[in-house]
Amino acid sequence: MKALDHMTVMLDAEQIQQAVADMAERINREVIASAATDREPVMVVVLKGAFLFASDLLRHLSRPIPVVFAHTRSQEERIVMTVEDQEFLRGRDLILVDILLDSGDSLKRLHRWLTDACQPASIRIAVLLHKTVLDPEPLPLDFLGYEVPDLRLVGYGMDEHQRFRGLPCVYTWWKPTPDLA
Ligand SMILES: O=P(O)(O)OC[C@H]1O[C@H](OP(=O)(O)OP(=O)(O)O)[C@H](O)[C@@H]1O
Ligand code: HPA
């Protein structure tokens, strides 16, 4: 049986694109409209998962703001960002964009690291999906698309063993996850 036969759509492309457009409209109104022309906010995209979400979001923004990339993984301490980008973020207003908040470990680690290493003026967080998991110290989310149940998700940037990131919908497994390793 093919992997796709194990999957069911949790959010279709239309639901995703509507949430992206709604979020962009709020960011335009609450962040971009009040930013000085010589101090545009900067989008920090969390790789790999946020690459599709961030590129869709950017195309709805009223100004083509600068973008930098940070790579981290939920199970790892390591954060990768070029030294030039770290310098570029100093004193800037950041919009930290990720596709999913699950345990919250990745974004908390990145938020701490950005604060210490880059000393930005401010950090706002934009996340498309938030798994409703119990977290005694939740990160405050400034912009959120959907609350989703605590199920393994793939598609729209999210993977299972590096597969399925390019799917335009968000899927979950309705049969046990097949062995993809
Ligand atoms: O809240 P958490 O439990 O930390 O999980 C959320 C993170 O997990 C995913 O990335 P992943 O670690 O799978 O790396 P990837 O994006 O490179 O696949 C996702 O893109 C988030 O960044
Ligand atoms: O549900 C998920 N899907 C893909 N990657 C993830 N990283 C944390 N949770 C998930």
Image (cartoon, helix red, strand yellow):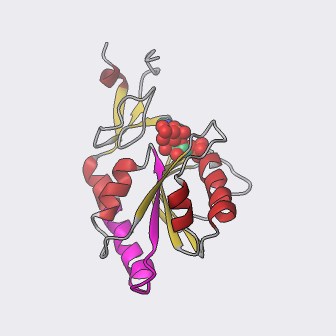
Q: What stretch is highlighted in magenta?
A: 20-47
Which of 172/75 is in front?
75
* Residue located at (36% from left, 38% from top): 155
Q: Is residue 176 magenta?
A: no
* Residue located at (42% from left, 29% from top): 162
Q: Is residue 37 visible?
A: yes
Which of 96/152 is in front?
96
* Residue located at (38% from left, 84% from top): 33
Quarter of the figure that contains the N terminus: top left
Write down the quadrant of residue 22 in the picture: bottom left
- The location of residue 146, given as percent across then percent down, is 44, 55
Q: Relative to residue 51, is residue 138 depicted above or below?
A: below
Number of marks in the image?
0
Q: Relative to residue 35, is residue 25 depicted above or below?
A: above
Which of 131/27 is in front?
27
Q: Is residue 102 visible?
A: no
Q: In this view, does 158 lie to the left or right of 74?
A: left
